[in-house]
């Protein structure tokens, strides 16, 4: 599903963000990527969505070497990968329904297929009763569930979540985890970069720990840190 082999990434500034990264993530796994600020977590995510290219080594998604992708093919890759951010990145002035439908409209889904699929997703993220609300009328947790809905409406093989609970209170963060677990249960691979040690230590999953551009631990059912 996701394969990184001997990946090095040096930014133009000369900063070496990743040194020698080897990661294999299989279908339907749920993986936390942890590590201090500046460790290289976002760079790993940007490599997966082909926002940046490795300086050395290779990144394969579903067997496709991302280095071989032409610019025109990148949107097709992005359809296989849903992305959720800490700050939601919703359109504030259109409804929850339209925020989610938008992801289907841009890929020219037939009109009559959009509504049933959006309703299905609203059910999954438990927002059926908020379909007509605008994001600014919702709580942070509800907004994040809209963002998750938008990210999965195309049924991507992979969901990337970059600090999805970063702006949420602990109770709300747990409900977001419930939603991500449901999505994983229905067959989507989930990769989540996080600083939330409480969640990582209590909701045990595979943990890939990064420090200074290197993988320092990769454990199934791992913890946030050695001390935890
Ligand atoms: P994390 O997500 O773990 O905080 P990042 O992957 O964002 O880490 O950053 C890893 C290193 O690369 C840091 O030293 C950061 O300052 C640097 N970096 C990230 N993005 C860029 C960029 N676009 N240009 C130059 N340096 C960058
Ligand atoms: P859902 O929204 O699907 O009902 P929940 O929010 O109840 O999901 O919980 C999601 C996951 O987090 C579950 O595995 C649950 O056991 C766990 N969980 C929920 N709250 C806590 C908590 N306060 N401490 C530890 N684990 C929790």
Image: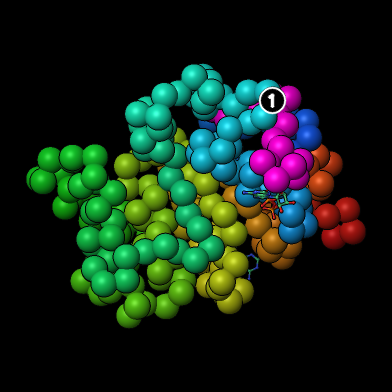
Depth check, front residue: 10 or 160: 10
Residue 116 in the image: x percent, y percent? 18, 50
Q: Is residue 3 magenta?
A: yes
Q: Is residue 2 magenta?
A: yes
Residue situated furthest front in the rendering: 13
What residue is at 42 percent from the left and 56 percent from the top? 148
Residue 224 in the image: x percent, y percent? 77, 55
What residue is at 20 percent from the left and 47 percent from the top? 105
User: What kind of element bears circle 1?
Assistant: strand
Would you identify the image quadrant in which residue 54 lies?
Answer: top right
Q: Is residue 77 above or below residue 38?
A: above
Tell whether 162 sits left or right of 23: left
Magenta segment's dominant SS is strand
Q: Is residue 169 above or below residue 144?
A: below
Rendering colour mode: rainbow
What residue is at 32 percent from the left and 80 percent from the top? 137
Tell whether 28 sits left or right of 195: left
User: What span is colored magenta in the figure?
Assistant: 1-17
* Residue of label 1: 56
Q: Can residue 125 be seen here?
A: yes
What residue is at 24 percent from the left and 40 percent from the top? 107
Q: Is residue 14 above or below residue 24?
A: below
Residue 2 in the image: x percent, y percent? 57, 30
Tell whether 164 sits left or right of 121: right
């Amino acid at each position: 599903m996701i394969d990184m082999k001997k990946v090095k990434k040096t930014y133009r500034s000369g900063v070496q963000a990743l040194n020698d990264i080897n990661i294999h993530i299989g279908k339907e796994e749920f993986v936390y990527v942890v590590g201090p600020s500046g460790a290289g977590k976002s760079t790993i995510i940007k490599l997966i969505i082909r926002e940046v290219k490795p300086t050395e080594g290779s990144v394969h998604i579903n067997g496709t070497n991302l280095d071989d992708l032409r610019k025109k093919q990148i949107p097709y890759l992005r359809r296989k990968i849903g992305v959720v951010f800490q700050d939601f990145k919703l359109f504030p002035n259109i409804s929850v329904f339209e925020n989610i439908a938008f992801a289907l409209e841009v890929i020219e889904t037939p009109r009559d297929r959009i509504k049933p699929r959006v309703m299905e997703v609203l059910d999954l993220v438990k927002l059926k009763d908020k379909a007509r609300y605008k994001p600014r009328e919702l709580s942070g947790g509800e907004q994040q569930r809209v963002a998750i809905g938008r990210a999965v409406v195309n049924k991507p093989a992979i969901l990337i979540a970059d600090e999805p609970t970063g702006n949420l209170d602990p109770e709300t963060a747990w409900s977001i985890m419930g939603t991500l677990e449901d999505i994983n249960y229905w067959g989507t691979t989930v990769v989540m970069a996080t600083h939330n040690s409480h969640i990582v230590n209590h909701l045990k999953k595979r943990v890939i720990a990064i420090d200074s551009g290197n993988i320092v631990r990769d454990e199934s059912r791992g913890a946030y840190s050695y001390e935890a």
